[in-house]
Image (cartoon, grey):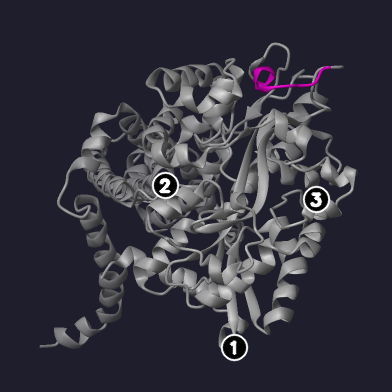
Amino acid sequence: MKLRPILWLLLPAAVLLAGFILAPSLDLFRASLFDPDFTMQHFQRLVDRGVYLDVMWRTIRVSLIVAVLCTVIGYPVAFFINLQPSRRQTLLLFLILIPMWMSILIRTYAWIVVLGRDGLVNQALAALGLAQEPVQMLFTSGAVLAAMVQILLPIQILTCYAAMTEIDFDLIRAARVLGARPRQAIARVFVPLSLDGTLTGLVIVFMLSMGFFITPALLGGRQDTMIANLIEFQVQRLNWSFAAALGVVLLVLTVAMIVLLRGAGRLLARRVLKGGL
Amino acid sequence: MNYTRFVLHAAIAASLAGPAAAEDKVLTIAGSGGVVKEITEKVFIPAFEEDTGWTTKFIAAESNIMLEVRTMLASGNMLYDAMEVSASNYPIGVQEGLLAPIDYALLDPDNQLPDKAKKEFGVVAAAYSTVLVQRLDKTPEGKKMQSWADFWDVETFPGPRSLNRQPQYTMEFALLADGVAKEDLYDVLGTDEGLDRAFAKLDEIKPYIPVWWTSGAQSVQLLSDGEVFYSSTYNGRVTKLQESGIPAEIVWNGGALHTSYVGIPKNAPNYKEAHDWIRVRTMRPDLEIQYVRQLPYPNFAPGLFDEMSEEVARNMPTYPANAEVQFVAYDEFWAANIDRIRERFDEWLLE
């Protein structure tokens, strides 16, 4: 029985997860269904009122857009870093990590300074004579998207980069030896091999976006409310059971979307590996 | 075990574990932060500590004090002895049984406080107003807003505006803008047609409100940054805004006059001493005048207005000329109707 001592290594993590993730999650389910007797009224309210479904749909949509934008911007950056000499790679990765040391709250506030009516962008527009009146950028969906992408981009870059360093460059050399032009070697060997890591990054960014709270609260208008904002709002209103129901829905939606994205990703990967891009 | 409450409670307990926690005779008082905290600590707390020999711990509970109290009650460990109770929180505290009744025989044996200062679960600590504030450097040349109807008039007064993300008083302002007399506000708001009318009026202004504020501090920040030109806010915050050089002016007409209270949470560890604090906070005109000079939130300390100059009095929400044009916020109406209206209001905001 060599396994047993190894299993002990998992004990601290298991205790932590059971005590601080599993038990509160179960309590969340309980709170959403018992108030104090068993009731479906909180879920009923969610379904009956269109506004809550709108918020859920918006949360999924915004998260998807952010995940795709982070991938589109992040993948080429990771590719570029991967091609640099190793010392420069370290420097570039360091630069990308720096903003992650700052709290999300501070990075969000920084956007207020940039996008406000008297902010940097409006000052620049006025100085260049491009706008007579200040442009309303704060408290719009665009502000929320820009900030979320900026905050989550390093995660996607690092995930893509990690996947790319795993790729054996001899395979690309082999493709070249066998007559592939550089672009073909990238498209048919490199990209398919980095696909799985890229999709993982996309799912991570999506997952984090689903729970975003501070950024839409500070930079968005009332039409940019996401599920997390709704939960906070209901907690403030002391509607804990309804807040719990929203929490359950957020959890279920996120898990469902992850399964869906992974499934779609796997299908895509299979096709890419078969036929190339 | 209820984990949500446990974790919340642990978080609050951790935030309270300061150096004073080790001492014995400590009265823990919760209230709003900012200027109120600053002045309370300068004026009332030294007087209380001198009178009683107790020390105090003042906790700034800015966002949702009722939520904290509810959590502490649920966890069986009340950490506050006395607390500020705002006009809108008072009915919640009463309804949910979060407050202990005031013992007036203990607090005021000689019956000095006027009746209007005394509530079953709180003593009036301050009167304040929710008023319309305008930035005079952003209004069109030579024009000033005079009423809520002007706030709704986006032709004459263009520019971004803000209102409170709470239906309380926001609904009243809409009805005033729609021409309802202030005497009739709550009669109109109490009917379904009246409520529809208020929402219809709010529909008109909705596109011109990029942001709905959720705290007094935020409303002032928005005005200060120039993100909005006009907003409802609390009158006491305007003084600070003006001191920082922003040309802000209060429109008293159509303001909501509120009274806030000092109360005792249920199961407070030092119920009797909390009354000593309430006495210092609400019945000492010599202290209250110092407070009022810096923050125009007067209470009913016996003999207070005798000590005031005309100039100070004119900035008071209870100054006759100001009080005359305001309506008295009717807490009991909101206590009875808040659930119905708030749910609709919240969903209206999301639409």
Please provide percent x and percent y for residue B173: 59, 26
Mark 3 secondary-structure assignment = helix
User: Is disc 1 in the same subunit as disc 2?
Assistant: no
Spatial CA distance of label 1 from label 2 is 35 Å
Q: Which one is closest to the eye, mark 3 or mark 1? A: 3
Q: Amino acid at mark 1?
A: Glu
Provide residue B220's location: percent of width, then percent of height. Answer: 70, 42
Residue of label 3: B305
- Foreground residue, A3 or A258? A258
Callout 2: SS: loop
Position of B47 with respect to B149 (left or right) is: right
Question: Image quarter for residue A166?
Answer: bottom left
Residue B40 versus residue A181 in the image, above or below:
below
Check chain identity for marks 3 and 1: say if they share one: yes
Q: Give percent across and percent down for residue A223.
A: 47, 30
Query: What is the residue that sits farthest to the top in this orientation?
Result: B155
Looking at this view, is B107 or B62 the one in front? B107
The three-letter amino acid code for the residue at tag 2 is Arg
Residue under numbered circle 1: B23
Task: Give the position of the C terminus of chain A as an image quadrant.
Answer: top left
Q: CA distance from mark 3 to mark 1?
A: 39 Å
Q: Which of label 3 and label 2 is nearer to you? A: 3
Residue A90 vertical position relative to residue A223 in the rendered view, above or below: below
Stretch of the chain drawn in magenta: B143-151
